[in-house]
Amino acid sequence: MAGAGFTAAMLRLVAVLIISCPCAMGLATPLAVMVGMGRGAEHGILFKSSTAMQQMQDVTHVVFDKTGTLTKGELALTDIVAPESQIDPPVSGNESSLENVLRFAASAEQGSEHPVARAIVAEAQARGLELSPPENFEAIAGHGVRADIDGHRVLLGTRRLIELESVDPARLSDLMLDLQAQAKTTMWVALDGHAIGGIGVADTIKPGAAKAVQALQNRGLEVTLLTGDNLATATAIAKEVGISSVFAEVLPEFKAAKIAELRSAGQVVAMVGDGINDAPALAEADVGLAIGTGTDIAMETADVTLMRGDLMAVSDALRLSAATLRNIKQNLFWAFGYNVALIPVAAGILAPFAFVPVFLRQLHPIMAAFAMIASDLVIVINALRLKRFRF
């Protein structure tokens, strides 16, 4: 009898050791994350880490950059205004003060890679204007540029730049406000301390931007527009896509501070951007999402890269994150439940009950091994269900 008791005890010991092997729990999280990240990659959503995927689930506030993110970033010059005349849209060959405004502006910007600068230079070239090389060129971050053109001091940039240089903007204020009310980016042009004209540049909203914003709002998330553009233009763009919260005229170095401000208020913030100026804000956010059509620096800084360039990918990333976290919880529930249920059985808790099948009263180690394999298979099959996630 003693030998039989020892044998039964050993069998139960080995069965308990096999059942309690934590392989199912070890597979529960990494397998779901791997499948979820792979499914995202198939549809152009690249998570850099499992932490980024987990944090996406907790996001409460989404902040969008404007140019190149909500808009296409393909700017075109639409208006040139001067104190006594206006032409809209610009017509090639019109010899007037408007041509001088454009010539000085394009001459100052011809070495710049900024989208606004490219639009101004492209229009000047299309009109056949002869541009002069800029001297003493200086780019003023978030404001504009300063340069000497043909012996004249030229300023091109925001109203704030004009005012900082003690140029009176009154002559152009009404004309520029009209352009801003039309959701156009405006650039003031000053020559030797006098405002001589202004330029209006327009961008177009990305297809599906309004739908993407609506999808986020339907999930109960707050959505904000963060841009360095003027308030009137930013408000008009925000209204068009359905955003009510706007931070406008924010210099690049202060974008990260705005994100930090939201986080300090208890928000879990996702920042969506595409440019070099957005990199600090992307790094500051709980989750940074870079548009794949943007700059390498933005994509390097962000936690998630949206290769599709489609803003619906933001909502898709949130949904995929939620589905993956839900799958992880299901896997862990099964793994813990399996151990909680079968460890007592392997230990012989059912041995006194004659009505219980023999293989459960004395769980053989081989049966325990099959049970462990079955548990792992359940985890694997459940994780693979993420492959069927629909975008």
Image (cartoon, rainbow, N blue to C red):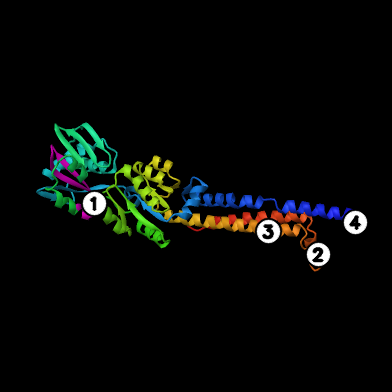
Look at label 3 and name its amino acid: Val
Look at label 2 and name its amino acid: Pro
Q: Residues within 10 Å of mark 1 (few under 14, many from 20)?
A: many
The furthest residue to the right: 1
Q: Earlier in the sequence, mark 2 or mark 4?
A: 4
Circle 4: element type: loop
Closer-to-camera residue (245/171): 245
Q: Nearer the viewer, mark 2 or mark 1?
A: 2
| Residue visible at 81% across and 52% down in the picture | 10
Q: Which residue is mark 1?
A: 184
Q: Earlier in the sequence, mark 1 or mark 4?
A: 4
Q: Earlier in the sequence, mark 1 or mark 3?
A: 1
Q: Which residue is mark 4?
A: 1
Residue 352: assigned label: 2
Q: Nearer the viewer, mark 1 or mark 3?
A: 3
Residue 100 coordinates in the image, percent (x, y)? 14, 41
Closer-to-camera residue (268/290): 268
Looking at the image, residue 300 lies above or below residue 380? above
Question: In this rendering, would 55 be left or right of 12?
Answer: left
Q: Which residue is mark 3?
A: 340
Q: Residues within 10 Å of mark 3 (few under 14, many from 20)?
A: few
Q: Quadrant of the image for the N terminus?
A: bottom right
Circle 2: element type: loop
| Residue visible at 45% across and 47% down in the picture | 304
Q: Is residue 37 visible?
A: yes
Residue 77 coordinates in the image, percent (x, y)? 23, 47
| Residue visible at 79% across and 56% down in the picture | 364
Is 139 magenta? The answer is no
Circle 3: element type: helix
Residue at mark 2 to residue at mark 1: CA–CA distance? 83 Å
Question: In this rendering, would 268 be left or right of 2?
Answer: left
